[in-house]
Amino acid sequence: MYGSTSHQQRAAVPLRTPSDPQQLLAYADRVSNWISAAILTCDSVKTQVALLTRYLCMGKFCYEARNFASAMQVLGALENRAVRQLPVWSLSLSKKTGSLQL
């Protein structure tokens, strides 16, 4: 019962999508920054590889589903300079990125 009250409170909060183009761009930047931060703050290389692989697959799925806005947010995060300089790109991701040529 206690968990259902918490769930009902969360469901009552409406999701607000920005309507102004400037707000949409700022939102996209925040999503990209969040993805980059999630990758950069991993505590191990194995976790970074797993997270990068997940986001690569997510970006490909968004692209194939023609959700180009989300695909660009993921791509923006993966093209972040700090993320691109991680040594995990040369480990096991070369196989994965080869299949993601758009």
Image (cartoon, rainbow, N blue to C red):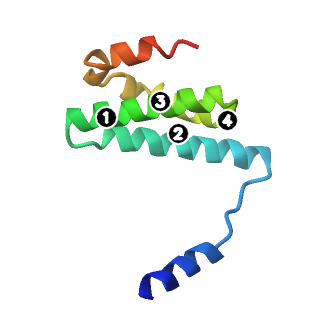
- Identified by mark 1, the residue type is Ala
Q: Distance between the residues labelled 4 and 2?
A: 11 Å
Q: How far apart are marks 2 and 1 (CA)?
A: 18 Å
For label 2, the residue is 32
66, above or below 13, in the image: above
For label 4, the residue is 69
- Mark 3: give few (<14), some (14-19) or many (20+) Cα within 10 Å: some
Q: In this view, does 29 lie to the left or right of 99?
A: right
Of the pair 62 and 21, the residue shown nearer to us: 62
Q: Residue at x 47, y 46 (%)?
A: 34
- Mark 1: give few (<14), some (14-19) or many (20+) Cα within 10 Å: some
Residue 62 % position (x, y): 60, 33
User: Would residue 77 be visible to someone looking at this image?
Assistant: no
Q: Is residue 22 left or right of residue 74?
A: right
CB under 8 Å between discs 3 and 4: no
Q: Quadrant of residue 29?
A: top right
For label 1, the residue is 50
CB under 8 Å between discs 2 and 3: no
Q: How far apart are marks 3 and 4 (CA)?
A: 15 Å
Image quarter (top left, top right, bottom left or bottom right) of the N terminus = bottom left
